[in-house]
Amino acid sequence: MKTFDPKTEAGEYIAPQGLYERNKSKPFLGSLTCNRREIVAGEWTELQLTYEVGGSGLADGAWLKLAFKFYSDWALFQTSDPMAANYISAEYHAGELVPGQSPATVQALKVRFDQKGHERPFQKTVIVDIVDGYLNPGDRIVIRLGDRRQGGAGTRVQSFVEKDFQFRLFIDPLGSSKFAEVPGDVLLDIVPGEPTGLHIVAPRLVNRDEPFDIIVRADDLWGNTCRQLPLQGQVALHGPGDETHTLPFTLAEQGWAVVRLGNLKLGTSGEWKIQASVEDIRVESATAYVNISSEAGTLRPLYADLHVHSDDTVGTNDTLYNLSYGRDIAGLDVLGYTANDFNITEQRWDKAVALIHSLNETGRFVCYPGTEWCGNSCAGGDRNIVFLRDSKPLFPFDEHGRMVRSFEWNEFTHGTLKPGAWPVDDLYAAYAHDPEGHLMMPHVGGRRCNLDWHHPELERLIEVSSAWGQFHWVYAEALQRGYRVGAAANSDEHQGRCGGGVPATAVFGSRGGLTGVLAETFDREGVAKALRARHTFATTGERSFASLRQGEYLMGDAYKTNASIPLEYQLLGDGGWEEVSLYDGELCIWTRNLHEEMGLANSRIRIKLGGARIKDRYRGAYWTGEIKISGAVIQDFTTYGLDHPEQACWRENATTIGFRTDTNGDSDTIEIQLSQLSGCHISFSSRIDSYIKVGDPLQPQAYVHAPEILVELQGDALLAETGIVRKLPGAELQVTIERITAQALPRELAGEISLSTLKLAPNREHPLFITARQRDQSRVWTSALFLSL
């Protein structure tokens, strides 16, 4: 097509000398550059991004959006205190003028930060407003993230690794609020930091003569697996009767710093202690445990993460990375890839399914494709669909050509939103013809499932824990409604660390969970059968083990029985079991307190913070406060359940401890050793804030239903009562102050519960399940026994 040529076509006119040629040589929408290409996960730094205005210029009243993905946990930016951390600024720098060209008239730039200032997935946004004037082509705007020039600490970058983290700039060149994407994203590689500790992945229970693998890896402070770190070390296995085996290893020289010690056999039954160490004083050693059962010929419990996202939709890093991480780093036996149904393109879906089929390996790594139906809670709420068969999944269209997405919208559809299978009734209709080929899991994510809807043939498991938090209440409610659903826990991983992932610092406030699967065969068919039979238990990311049975019946079974046969439970963990409770739906009908059984100490107390503000998104309760003691001295203190380095507890003086943490349905504890409990006074005070979705991060936003809490009690009262619980408005939100034991708690727990003592009503089904907690605040839930007397 012929281009304009003002020199020959425009005739005589007046214009700045050489400006036409210069402007035509520039990208019309400008360009964005950055002073860094690589940063370390969780580091503090100042980052400079420079936008050079393109040939379009920027009109008076225009604005810019520097956007990145919502699920990044980069620290929240602020503009109110230039001497504080995470301060952001924007400066105007005029470009060179040509003869006859007038300078730009812009007088100032105004900066703000909005967590949802643009469209998914680029929602977190630094917004720059052009104040009182326009900008010329060639002018520059320098945005400083973590501006340190006035004494600020910089900005704490995203805590998890990512290849090609994207900053994308959108500009409104005409001041019309119609945004255009500046070509050429700024790409950053976010890499692991220095190693701080080893991590061991091993099954918690193995049957005699069954081979198993041990994975050892080196992680940084934020839980990212290091790379290119060929450290030498050894694994020591200490078994019953002082039996010991030593296995030398070297972490991989290239790629992830990991080693897999395969095909191990330990013939002696009982508990074995696994210790891993390396020849590097920076790196803490690690300990895990495995029990060798006296049984033979049966399959060990398998560990599954059935809810793993990649960058096909809103996850981090590509699908191969996530699947490989799950298999090789997290040591998963079973993985369920999940695509947000409205967001994935058909081309990406087909490619992902082909990859999953190629990686599925009987006896080593069972892998399923799946989608997440993302309907609003008013239409049924989040449901995952795991496609259990080897054939091509019915997605994005069913066999009748009907769209089975909740709706269709992504960054390539240019804002249009096409409704599909909505509400969840339509989703049931799409897959009810083949329930054995599908597993549907309601869950609490961004949009929580609404239990007004339930399909008994499709929905066999419900997610009780994930990176979003812990949701005992949703499991108990489902069972109370009479739904036969079993317990599952998954990561809902968006950050590239599936399989019991490490928590980030934003809306994902908990460790990702794991589903324990009791399958008869280690293949797609055998695992699928066990999942649909509800032969499962759920953990908060640990390789714990939990079992509940009655005679020949296993958790998940529905049957009629009599009260003469007791319930049997078994728990295996690493942190020491402190309590185990039996529930009948929402009602706790039996409990066992191991602190009391081991003997409560007269001078050791614990403060436990737990629960969430609300059941929906942004549920975190943010606690900031102190514990004051009078009449005694704090001799020592220890914390459990804190998830990342920004959750902290510190000594202020001899009688005061300060703390800062957040809970999302999980629990955090502070154990305190006092010089004496008798005669002392204990005062607990805390502010409870909400997640700062909108507003200044330096200005806390109080939780309106319980903005402050004060609990005071005498040590003598605690000696008499053993503990008090202050329940707060919210989702299982509460503070507990209690005495605890000074003794080591058992890693293995087993026992019987007499049905006759429970006084269960006859002629109705009772969904009986166990939940148990360890001292480190990790938890397990069993699927229920659905029994009728």
Image: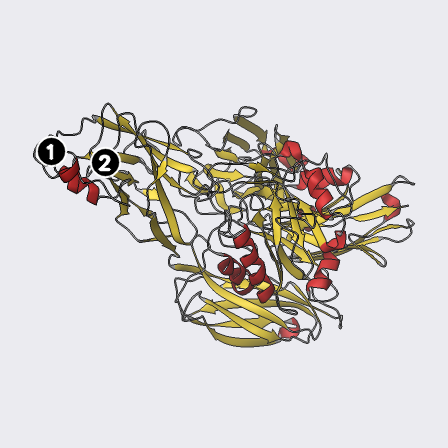
Q: Is residue 121 visible?
A: yes
The quarter of the rendered structure image containing the N terminus is top left
Q: Which of 626 and 287 is in front in this view?
A: 287
Residue beneath disc 1:
16
Amino acid type at circle 2 is: Gln
Image position of 124 with respect to 554: above or below: above
Q: Please, what is the three-letter code of the amino acid marked with disc 1?
A: Pro
* Nearer-the-camera pick, 447 or 235: 447
Q: Is residue 350 left or right of residue 138?
A: right
Snapshot colouring: secondary structure
Instruction: For mark 1, give the secondary structure.
Output: loop
Q: Residues within 10 Å of mark 2 (few under 14, many from 20)?
A: few
Q: Residue 111: percent from the left, percent from the top? A: 31, 30
Q: Are marks 1 and 2 in contact (CB under 8 Å)?
A: no
Image-quadrant location for residue 209: bottom right
- Figure check: 35 above or below 253: above
Which label's residue is closer to the chain start, 1 or 2?
1
Image coordinates of residue 331 in percent, x first then y, are 57, 63
What residue lies at 45% left-to-right and 56% top-to-bottom? 224
Task: Name the image quarter holding residue 215.
Answer: bottom right
- Which residue is the site of mark 2? 150
